[in-house]
């Protein structure tokens, strides 16, 4: 029998204090630009937490959990670091040059002005220099949010490394010390565990959706179009962008779709229309996948996540967009635990 809201016990002062401290921590993480450290730490912690029991069972005798967790944490940190470095190296290489892709898109848009309707042309930049200027102004305005260049990139990398190390240390601490005994520490641990659970449900579900979307996109760009004699440039880069951008619910699709359609215009308007049609069909399918996978994981519909992302973007910028699904899943879990939603 399901409990009604009146049957839930009233939270004591310790739980309320833990809620307030957790809320303050979540806001400060965004204000201090520590979201990358948080996500990296949660990723390592959840991976270790999921895999450690299996490793301990198969490779170590009973009572060697600390050794299993320590070795696994080291391997996970190394693999995640290698994945990040490999992605950055690919996007900077000749095969996956992101600057070259952006330059190609600018050239395509300039050439397309003669074939597009007047109402659309009026909303496009006059030439490549205007597009570059617009992009430069946007990057300058959002420099603090994008954090992609120079010292900011180094700082983000350091945050990721520290976050992964902290996540590994917390996993090891949990394996050794177990449950906290003091009331406030216990309440905070429960909040942190719920946040970690929200991260695992949202991120791992979104990874599954992004992998499915990337697989269909790779089939279309790498197999279907070549069968009809269409060879688009930057196919590998577009596939990589589809997966990376697909980790962001809703808006990730807009980013990857825009890139694919613009690059398709380099071949012909017909190919661009075909690409747009394919992407619309795929994302109709993906809408049902979102409802099934994400909805089943956090009991949230696509419009709920979109509203949360819009609100968080207005308050915190791009980091808010990244954090919104996780924060929303956490808050909803807290409310559901009290029988309020």
Image (cartoon, helix red, strand yellow):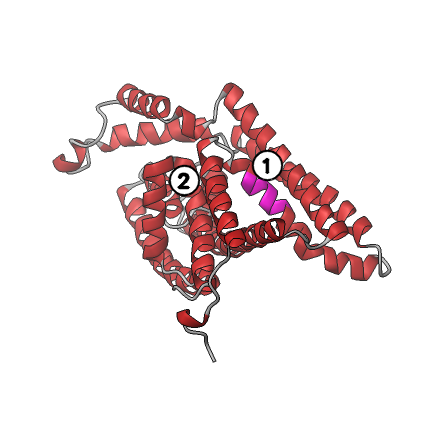
Tell me if mark 1 has few (under 14), some (14-19) or many (20+) residues whose alpha carbon lies within 10 angstroms of its own.
few
In the rendered structure, the answer to whether residue 127 lies left or right of residue 292 reads left
Q: How would you rate the neighbour count of disc 2 (Cα within 10 Å): few for under 14, some for 14-19, many for 20 or more?
A: many
Residue 282 in picture, x, y percent from top left: 38, 57
Does 104 appear above or below 174? above
- Rendered view: 109 above or below 241: above
- How far apart in space, not on screen, are marks 1 and 2 (Cα)? 21 Å
- Image position of 158 with respect to 223: above or below: above
Residue, far front? 13
| In-image side of 15 versus 271 (left or right) | right
Residue 74 counted in the magenta span: no
Name the residue beneath numbered marker 1.
84
Query: Which quadrant of the rendered structure holds the C terminus?
Result: bottom left
Residue farthest along the bottom direction in this orientation: 1
The local secondary structure at tag 2 comes to helix
Residue at x 30% of width, y 45% of height:
272
- Residue 233 in the image: state x and y as whole percent: 43, 36
**What percent of the width, then of the height, locates residue 294?**
45, 59
Q: Which residues are magenta?
A: 38-44
Residue of label 2: 320
Image coords of residue 284 (percent x, y): 34, 59
Which of the 4 quarters of the picture holds residue 120? top left
Q: How many badges with numbers are in the image?
A: 2
Which numbered disc, 1 or 2, marks the residue that appears first in the sequence? Answer: 1
The residue under the point 63% across, 33% down is 162
């Amino acid at each position: 029998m399901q409990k009604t809201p009146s049957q839930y016990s009233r939270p004591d002062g310790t739980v309320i204090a833990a809620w307030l401290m957790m809320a303050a921590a979540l806001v400060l993480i965004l204000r201090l630009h520590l979201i990358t450290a948080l996500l990296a730490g949660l990723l390592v912690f959840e991976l270790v937490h999921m895999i450690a029991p299996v490793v301990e069972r198969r490779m170590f005798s009973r009572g060697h959990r600390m050794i299993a967790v320590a070795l696994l944490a080291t391997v996970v940190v190394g693999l995640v670091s290698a994945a990040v470095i490999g992605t950055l190296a690919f996007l900077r290489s000749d095969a996956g040059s992101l600057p070259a892709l952006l330059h190609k898109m600018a050239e395509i848009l300039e050439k397309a002005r003669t074939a597009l309707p007047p109402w659309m042309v009026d909303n496009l930049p006059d030439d490549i220099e205007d597009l570059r200027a617009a992009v430069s102004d946007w990057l300058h305005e959002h420099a603090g949010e994008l954090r992609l260049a120079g010292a900011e990139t180094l700082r983000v990398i350091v945050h990721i490394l520290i976050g992964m190390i902290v996540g590994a240390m917390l996993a090891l601490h949990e394996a050794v010390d177990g449950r906290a005994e003091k009331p406030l520490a216990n309440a905070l641990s429960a909040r942190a565990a719920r946040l970690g659970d929200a991260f695992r449900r949202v991120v791992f579900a979104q990874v599954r959706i992004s992998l499915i979307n990337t697989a269909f996109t790779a089939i279309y760009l790498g197999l279907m179009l070549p069968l009809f004699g269409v060879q688009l440039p930057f196919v590998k880069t577009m596939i990589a962008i589809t997966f990376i951008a697909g980790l962001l619910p809703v808006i990730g699709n807009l980013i990857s779709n825009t890139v694919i359609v613009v690059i398709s215009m380099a071949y012909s308007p017909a190919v661009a229309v075909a690409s747009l049609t394919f992407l619309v069909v795929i994302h109709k399918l993906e809408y049902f996948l979102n409802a099934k996978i994400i909805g089943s994981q956090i009991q949230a519909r696509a419009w709920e996540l979109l509203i949360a992302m819009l609100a968080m973007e207005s308050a915190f910028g791009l980091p808010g967009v990244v954090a919104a699904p996780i924060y929303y899943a956490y808050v909803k879990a807290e409310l559901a635990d009290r029988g309020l939603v």
